[in-house]
Image (cartoon, grey):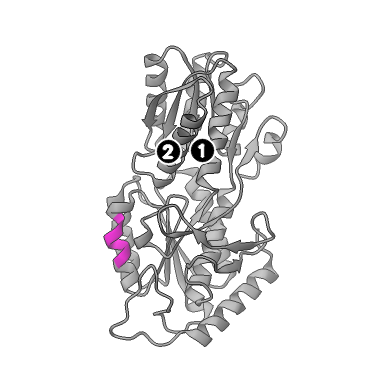
């Protein structure tokens, strides 16, 4: 993911930038989402502590994000703190944010469970000079310097609707969405994009239900069973969450309904390999590499702390060899009025490549 030489170069660049641009903390300085100044004292990389706070523990997708993040931070010579609450709630994340503020970390990268509820805690963190960024599931634009996004929202929505239409067949039919939590900003944005795509070209599709499994496997199983029971003409379940797609695929397969109901969405190859096939419950699905999302967030955090970027639109930096352009990234305007960095395009997993990818992540 990141060559050792590149790690050393990035680290050296970061230290140089800090030595050139960072002064001592003033008594009246505060950090905001638009701040262009660093409020941390100049530090060697070995003195930096950078944290990642994901949605919840026991979520394989979150674990991969954290692993990618941790590798980049530690390769740069800094200390990495990984936080994951037991449940995917804002309250649990707020407690951990406050703990990280008390530890005087230099940066926090967070996958938010509820953007509105998290805002006071995150703004307080920024007022203490902590660089705050979000990844995967964004927080409010006033609560962050920049967001690290998997792929463009409209592209994801269009891709998922195209998949549902393809699996439903020429006549269309009923389909349902099995999401994560009702407050998940990324899930909600993708679903809204899907609905906008359906308004432009429904292709005979009828969205009958948006169910929420809260990114918990058993609840996602229960929601899938309810969908099958309540909508006997259901043709497709689209789950834009790795926990949901695996639960839906298992339920439909176990019930012997793979000839009548298909499942697609966003899933981990290692978890979905047994369910992917031309005649299986999931002919194909999409995702991006969560290791890379974590890594990109880590590069971004290092650049923010080093002062080489502020999170403003138009700024550019290099993140190892990630993405579609050999590690080159530009910060762009986000739909919520803030800014974001887009990792790349969704990747399609199907019978032709799933065996190669299932051992990767």
Instruction: Determine whether the residue tagged by mark 2 lies in a helix, strand or loop.
Output: helix
Residue where numbered disc 1 is placed: 157
Q: Marks 1 and 2, Cα distance to the nearest angstrom?
A: 8 Å
| Residue under the image location 36 percent in, 56 percent down | 140
Residue pointed to by mark 2: 192
Pick the residue in front: 227 or 325: 325
Q: Position of residue 101 (x, y in %)?
A: 33, 68
Q: In which quarter of the image is residue 145?
A: bottom left
Q: Is residue 99 visible?
A: yes
- What is the magenta segment's predominant secondary structure? helix
Q: Percent x, y for residue 81?
A: 44, 63
Magenta range is: 118-123
Q: Which mark is residue 353?
A: none
Question: Is the residue marked by circle 1 packed among few (<14), some (14-19), or many (20+) residues within 10 Å?
Answer: many
Q: In this view, does 90 lie to the left or right of 106?
A: left
| 192 versus 6 height, above or below | above
Q: Do the residues labelled 1 and 2 touch (CB within 8 Å)?
A: yes
Crowding at label 2, few (<14), some or many (≥20) Cα neighbours within 10 Å? some
Secondary structure beneath disc 1? Answer: helix
Question: Considering only vertical position in the picture, is 255 above or below 340?
Answer: above
């Amino acid at each position: 993911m990141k060559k050792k030489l590149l790690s050393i170069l990035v680290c050296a660049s970061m230290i140089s930038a800090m030595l050139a641009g960072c002064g001592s903390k003033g008594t009246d300085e505060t950090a905001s989402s638009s701040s262009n100044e660093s409020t941390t004292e100049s530090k060697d990389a070995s003195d930096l502590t950078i944290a990642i706070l994901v949605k919840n523990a026991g979520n394989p997708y979150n674990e991969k994000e954290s692993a990618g993040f941790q590798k980049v931070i530690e390769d740069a010579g800094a200390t990495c703190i990984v936080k994951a609450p037991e449940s995917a709630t804002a309250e649990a994340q707020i407690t951990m944010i406050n703990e990280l503020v008390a530890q005087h970390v230099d940066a926090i990268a967070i996958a938010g469970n509820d953007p509105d509820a998290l805002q006071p805690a995150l703004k307080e963190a920024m007022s203490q000079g902590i660089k705050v960024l979000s990844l995967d599931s964004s927080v409010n634009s006033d609560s962050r310097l920049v967001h690290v996004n998997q792929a463009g929202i409209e592209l994801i929505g269009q891709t998922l609707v195209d998949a549902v239409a393809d699996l439903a067949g020429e006549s269309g039919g009923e389909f349902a969405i099995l999401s994560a939590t009702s407050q998940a900003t990324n899930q909600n944005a993708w679903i809204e994009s899907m609905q906008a795509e359906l308004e432009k070209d429904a292709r005979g599709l009828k969205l009958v239900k948006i169910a929420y499994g809260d990114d918990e496997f058993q609840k996602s199983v229960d929601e899938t069973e309810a969908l099958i029971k309540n909508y006997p003409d259901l043709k497709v379940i689209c789950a834009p969450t790795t926990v949901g797609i695996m639960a839906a695929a298992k339920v439909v397969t176990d019930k012997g309904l793979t000839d009548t109901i298909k499942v697609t969405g966003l899933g981990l190859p290692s978890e979905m390999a047994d369910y992917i096939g031309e005649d299986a419950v999931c002919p194909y699905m999409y995702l991006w590499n969560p290791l890379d999302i974590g890594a990109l967030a880590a590069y971004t955090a290092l650049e923010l702390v080093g002062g080489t970027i502020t999170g403003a639109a138009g700024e550019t930096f290099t993140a190892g060899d990630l993405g579609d352009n050999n590690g080159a990234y530009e910060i762009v305007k986000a739909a919520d009025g803030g800014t974001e960095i887009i990792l790349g395009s969704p990747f399609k997993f199907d019978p032709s490549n799933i065996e190669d990818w299932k051992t990767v992540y």
